[in-house]
Image (tube, rainbow, N blue to C red):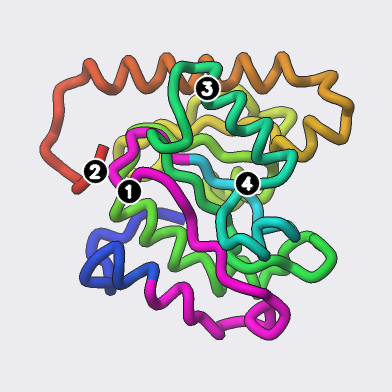
């Protein structure tokens, strides 16, 4: 997966408007609403998770449940707020029963995520869990082997995989230190890329 050079959408608002009315896959028949994303559309740091859960489906906002509270805490731990970053998911509609998203659902939503990345042009992307990591890195390697490492996405974006907050909660927080360490890696990457010479590309960041 890569960022398209030319977006089929005239603006970020046009992209969101189309996504909110999407009927590309069967999830359109079971969702309460589309969870497009939230945060700063000019963010330097973007998070990509898996898909909405029950509370997200109800509110239309990503990461608002217990996993979202943990994500917020981790973001604040590196001196930022949710208003500073952008948060999105691989799929924009909740899979019934919080099941894993199916290949058809991922492929149907893929153009939306690709366009979000293209408009926002973050300097750093943190993928939360296996689905986002495997999609953006086009790999089959699991998150436990990739987390905390830096990869290049597109031409110049630093991508850092980390554990999904839900997975951390399922272990009772025993691996929270790993998540905190990965967020520190992201913070350092932000600082390093901010100091690098600008190439004049992109609308955000």
* Depicted 169 relative to depicted 140: above or below: above
Q: Residue 29 carries which label?
A: none
Residue at image location 52% in from the left, 35% down from the top: 126
Magenta-colored span: 17-46
| Dots 3, 1 in contact, CB < 8 A | no
Q: Residue 76 carries which label?
A: 3
Q: In this view, does 75 lie to the left or right of 2?
A: right
In the image, residue 49 lies at what x, y percent?
61, 47
| Dots 2, 1 in contact, CB < 8 A | yes
Q: Which mark is residue 204?
A: 2
Tell which circle, 2 or 4, labels the residue nearer the N-terminal end.
4
Q: Nearer the viewer, residue 133 or 59?
A: 59
Q: Which of marks 2 and 1 is in front?
A: 1
Q: Is residue 77 left or right of residue 158?
A: right
For the question of whether residue 170 can be seen, the reply is yes
Residue at image location 43% in from the left, 43% down from the top: 86
Q: Gap in Å between the C-alphas at discs 3 and 1?
A: 19 Å
């Amino acid at each position: 997966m890569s960022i398209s050079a030319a977006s089929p959408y005239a603006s970020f608002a046009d992209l969101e408007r189309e996504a909110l009315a999407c009927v590309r896959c069967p999830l359109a028949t079971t969702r309460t609403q589309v969870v497009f994303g939230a945060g700063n559309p000019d963010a330097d740091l973007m998070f990509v998770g898996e898909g909405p859960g029950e509370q997200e489906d109800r509110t239309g906002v990503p990461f608002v449940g217990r996993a979202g509270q943990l994500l917020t805490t981790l973001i604040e731990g590196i001196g930022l707020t949710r208003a500073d970053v952008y948060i999105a998911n691989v799929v924009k509609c909740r899979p019934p029963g919080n099941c894993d998203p199916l290949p058809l659902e991922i492929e149907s939503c893929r153009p939306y995520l690709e366009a979000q990345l293209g408009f926002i042009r973050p300097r750093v992307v943190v993928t939360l869990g296996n689905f986002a990591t495997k999609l953006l890195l086009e790999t089959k390697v699991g998150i436990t082997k990739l987390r905390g490492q830096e990869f290049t996405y597109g031409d110049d974006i630093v991508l850092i995989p980390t554990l999904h907050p839900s997975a951390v909660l399922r272990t009772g927080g025993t691996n929270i230190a790993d998540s905190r360490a990965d967020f520190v890696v992201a913070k350092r990457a932000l600082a390093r890329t901010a100091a690098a010479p600008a190439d004049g590309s992109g609308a955000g960041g």
